[in-house]
Image: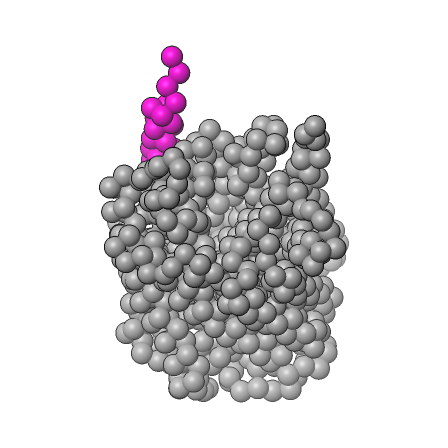
Amino acid sequence: MTAETAVGTIGGRAAKFRTCQFTGLKVDTAAQTLIKVNAVAAVIFLLLGGVMGLLVALTRWPAVHLLPAELFYLVLTGHGANVLLFWIIFFEVAVLYFASAILLNSRLATPKLAWLAFLLMVAGAVLANVAVLRGESSVMFTSYPPLMAEPIFYLSLILFAVGTLIAVGIFFATLVIAKEEGTYEGSIPLVTFGALTAAIIAVFTLASGAIILIPTLLWSVGLISNIDPLLYKVVWWGMGHSSQQINVSAHVAIWYMIAALLVGAKPLSEKVSRTAFLMYILFLQLASAHHLLAEPGLDPSWKIVNTSYMMYLAVVGSMVHGLTVPGSIEAAQRRNGFDKGMFEWLRKAPWGHPAFSGMFLSLVMFGFIGGISGVVLGTEQLNVLMHNTLYVPGHFHGTVVAGTTLAFMAATYLVLPLIFQREIVWPTLAKWQPYLFGIGAGMISLFMMGAGTLGMPRRHWDITFSDAVIGYEPSAGAFLMMGLNGIGALLASVGGAVFILVVVGTVLFGKKVQSGHQLTFPLHAGGGKAASEYGSHATTKLPGTAVLVAIFFVSFVLYYFINWKYLSELWLFR
Amino acid sequence: MSDTQSEETGPAERQEPIPMMQRILDSPFLLLFLGVVVPTVLYTIWGVMEVASIPLAQ
């Protein structure tokens, strides 16, 4: 097998493809190019959004308080759009093309339409940044009416959503082509199933966005006189929170993919893991309601059914993945010969491989920080403890930054040699990068959650409320947390800068991967097969995973009940 | 004789019904339907009805 491109057939149709020398997979070159351009666009918007994020953190750092108020809200809006939408969704489109065309050995459906999708997304993302930087659209990520942005701001988001919807459609079309042309046997692999979950959630997300942003655009140009703020919130959060559920599904799929490619891990049970994804498909979007738990206009039954009942079913799905991902790694490592004691499999895991370390840190922090805090926020009674405080950004930095972004960074260390076909430059820097970024992201999440628990408001430039009629000043401990949050942001920024440096250096100057090349960060010999074929490797000999899961459950229960205790002390019923 | 038997059991094995759950999980468009309808009904439509039923201030 060589890395060179050849003209051949995929599923009986002529297409340009190459056979990957490391995974044995047929790579459609049209899909490969589209994965590259979407990944590059993602990294550009990560850079932009990351710089804005650092400016936000330095302004929230009381001793620094860098930006004036107007610039703070402008930068906060840009930060949200660039990292929560553009970085994440460009990368997810790359994941969708990889999980369909590459993992199924198929050609990509309608590459020309995929280019149109990409151009629409780029146009939308660029226009949104122009709108924000002009200074007339500082409405923050949520853009709640009656705050009104320039029409171009809403138009740009609609353009971006239409482009993404086309890309999602191409993913579904590629699944159909692969099945009809028989490029795989039986069921699709689990990684592709995870991507399918992300694509399904994306359809609901983008439909919700269209339903609310089109009338909001008409309102901003004066064709509609009024947008009901509560109605806007309900429908907008169908997009705003569900867009983050696309991330969860995509990064869980990436966890399985990295585990397969690096240690040859197969799912412990295809049935169980797929059922966990099914829980996401049915119930994960309903967690959007937790943003509205403090709204007086909505009935408690709507709130409780959507969060405390349905959302918990999706949480069960996450906990299943939290068991099966490390479990499949443990099982594979034991098969690889690391079978001594309880934790040799973990100690001798490829911690020097940035894809593995990034993936595992993402798994741990998503579960312990983002996951547990998400359940607490989704409980109606506990939600009042930290609603609209800095706890909320702390929670979603635990899911989207420490969880999704770190997982996507980890995946990039595989995309570079396998898709860009470039050897990673500065491998020592690359080895340290996930730790720098991960620890920084973990600090940001924990200290924002800590400050929020102590009453620190979110979305405020002046956290001391110095000109408020009724004064309120957060405690000294909360201010300390804000300083520590700033230090965490600096650390994460260094990690982010190293990531950009390594990616750009590799794409521009990395040694071309030729036939017979030995990768600096090698894959498992059976990794390609493990990632691209249906099948489980069932075992119950997972003592290490059992201990890790037990630690998780103890932490979960303790933190949950500590918050109930805290609530009981704030609301004294006598 | 044994050859005959194996020929007879071969198609029978292939005709073994696929479990319903697997058929659901193997149907991307059924999953798409469920994944859009469930949140649309439970979250969006119910939520919009809640907002619409708030009485207007006099």
Viewer-proximal residue among A555 and A182: A555
The residue depicted at 50 percent of the width and 67 percent of the height is A133
Displayed quadrant of residue A371: top left
A540 vs A302: above or below: below
Judge from the rendering whether residue A480 lies leftward or rightward of residue A84; answer left or right: left
Judge from the rendering whether residue A227 lies leftward or rightward of residue A478; answer left or right: right
Measured as percent of width and height from the top left, residue A400 is found at: 45, 54
Measured as percent of width and height from the top left, residue A36 is found at: 53, 76
A135 vs A513: above or below: above
Q: Is residue A338 magenta?
A: no
Viewer-proximal residue among A263 and A143: A143
Looking at the image, can residue A33 be seen? yes
Displayed quadrant of residue A509: bottom left
Measured as percent of width and height from the top left, residue A456 is found at: 36, 42
Judge from the rendering whether residue A89 lies leftward or rightward of residue A331; answer left or right: right
The residue depicted at 43 percent of the width and 70 percent of the height is A47
**Numbered disc total:** 0
The residue depicted at 43 percent of the width and 85 percent of the height is A508
Looking at the image, can residue A519 be seen? no
Considering the whole magenta stretch, tell me its main secondary structure.
helix
Highlighted range, magenta: A554-574
Viewer-proximal residue among A392 and A90: A392
